[in-house]
Amino acid sequence: MTDPPPAGGGPGGERGSAQPCRSPGVLFDGHTSVAVVSGAPDGIVAVDEEGVIRLCNPAAAELFGRPATELVGAPFGFPVVAEEAAEIDLVLPSGAARVVDMRVTATNAAGERLHIATLRDVTERRSAERELEAALERQDAVVAVAAHELRGPLAAISVLAHTLRDAGARLTEEQRTDIAERVIERTERLQTLVRRRLTAARIDARATHVAPQPVPVLEFVLERLAELGEHAAQVDVSCPPGAVAYVDRGDFREMLVNYLENAFTYGRPPVGIHVTEPAAHLEVRVRDHGPGVPPDFVPRLFRRFSRAPDAVRNAEGTGLGLWIVRALARAGGGDAWYEPVAAEGGAAFCLRLRRGPPVQEPPEEGRLTPRSDEGSGRC
């Protein structure tokens, strides 16, 4: 006999009355033997017709997060049907949740009918399956959005190319030049879409390889402005002389270009790039003089595929640019955020970058640290 189970019910969360229990060991009815094996990797519990646990092994106790002395005599709390499999959700005393695969067989032992439930923790497997399902859903969304985005520029290029082929001889030189410029514009748009898609895929695959190095900020910004063409004249730059960011050059280019494209697409010139050096970080702000961001949309601003309603109606976009900026910034030990410009109107999109390598924590006193070349094959 065991003491009654504690008030509050059994592991399944249901309250039940105390019942006598048998000593752990082997139950038999002359035909069937069911051993509750201490070393079995799966949890095993024997449940009587009243739903009360009569026996359990150490693996079951570990699975429920409770000692065997509490489990034996307590209500199981889950329906048990012979020859059926089911998944049950366990909530441990700590509040943690587990998904458990349960398979049930029935036996008669000493004239008593018992259900033997074999329990296996499948929490990690189910979590991996959910992550895979979510990844597949994201992939489907990416493909659908990409197809929609690419259709417009490709259709425009096709129309312009057919116009040149079918009516080129009748067009003036000015008209042909205009068509060529529009083809170039659409092609550059396609290149931007593809670049962002590739960057997003790299982030999703956790394949972002960050190779930070000292980058002279003013020189780097001026190089990016040279790539803007006619927009370069509409950008003012303020940067302390000698300012250096410790950042991956490719990621820095992607972040700055995305901010500038955002300013010219959704804001209005003039656009300002302002660099400051607070504390151990360097901050870059790209300001425009547009309408700013609606306050209720700000919390969603850096989410993937997130676009304000006015932006969807009035401008082309992927909804990826700001999400990419924040992901790359955080991968390099920085951050990205938005600040409203209340006094003059407009928006400021901000970027925090390191000014140097992360400071290594000094070793604890009395604690040995390995040599830098330890394990490298050097003698």
Image: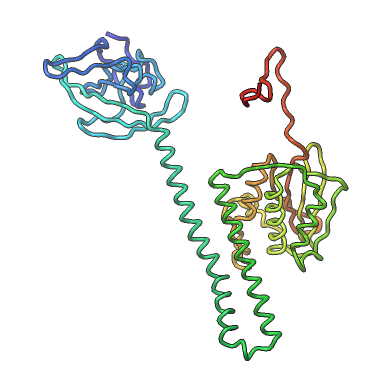
Q: Report the side of 373 relative to 85 (left or right).
A: right
Image quadrant in which the C terminus is located: top right
- In the image, residue 287 sits, relative to residue 20, either above or below, namely below
Residue 220 position, x and y percent, is 78, 52
Q: Is 362 in front, or is 106?
A: 362
Q: Residue at x 73, y 47 (%)?
A: 351
Q: Is 216 in front, or is 262?
A: 216
Q: Quadrant of residue 317?
A: bottom right
Q: Residue at x 62, y 70 (%)?
A: 186
Q: Report the side of 198 relative to 338 (left or right).
A: left
Residue 155 position, x and y percent, is 54, 74
Q: Report the side of 93 relative to 1 (left or right).
A: right
- In the image, residue 26 sits, relative to residue 123, either above or below, namely above
- In the image, residue 206 sits, relative to residue 121, either above or below, namely below
Q: Residue at x 75, y 42 (%)?
A: 246
- Of all residues, the one furthest to the left in this rendering is 30
Residue 271 position, x and y percent, is 78, 60
- Of all residues, the one furthest to the bottom in this rendering is 170
Q: Residue at x 27, y 8 (%)?
A: 1
